Amino acid sequence: YESASLFPQAEPGMIAPEEGTEWLLQLLREVQLEHFYLRIRDDLNVTRLSHFDFVKTVDLERIGIGRP
């Protein structure tokens, strides 16, 4: 597979994934939470799937993801 086909050049207002975090943006798109991509990547420092092991509920609430 070619990542360029999954993530075309970003248009104004679109989020462009940082090198190595394309998987995160794709995952968030699948669950319709892509608008949290930058907050998860930058505020919570999640750049690998294993980093979610260290994310607590309070961290998610701080960036705007709460329980339904």
Image (spheres, helix red, strand yellow):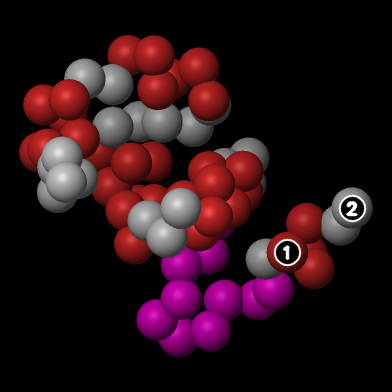
The amino acid at mark 2 is Tyr
Q: Residue visible at 10% across and 38% down?
A: 62
User: Does dot 2 land on a helix, a strand or a loop?
Assistant: loop
The amino acid at mark 1 is Leu
Numbered label attached to residue 1:
2
Residue that carries the numbered disc 1 in the rendered image: 6
Asked if residue 65 is among those painted magenta in the image, a careful observer would answer no
Residue 67 visible in the picture: yes
Q: Residue visible at 32% across and 53% down?
A: 36
Query: In the drawing, does residue 40 fall left or right of residue 43?
Result: right
* Above or below: residue 13 compared with residue 49: below
Numbered label attached to residue 39:
none
Residue 18 visible in the picture: no
Query: In the drawing, does residue 18 fall left or right of residue 1?
Result: left
Query: In the drawing, does residue 18 fall left or right of residue 12?
Result: right
Where does the image place residue 22, in percent across and percent down from the top left? 61, 49
Q: Magenta stretch?
A: 8-18
Where does the image place residue 64, in percent across and percent down from the top left? 14, 49
CB under 8 Å between discs 1 and 2: yes
* Above or below: residue 17 compared with residue 21: below
Q: Residue visible at 54% across and 55% down?
A: 30
Q: Return the disc, 1 or 2, that comes first in the chain's sequence.
A: 2
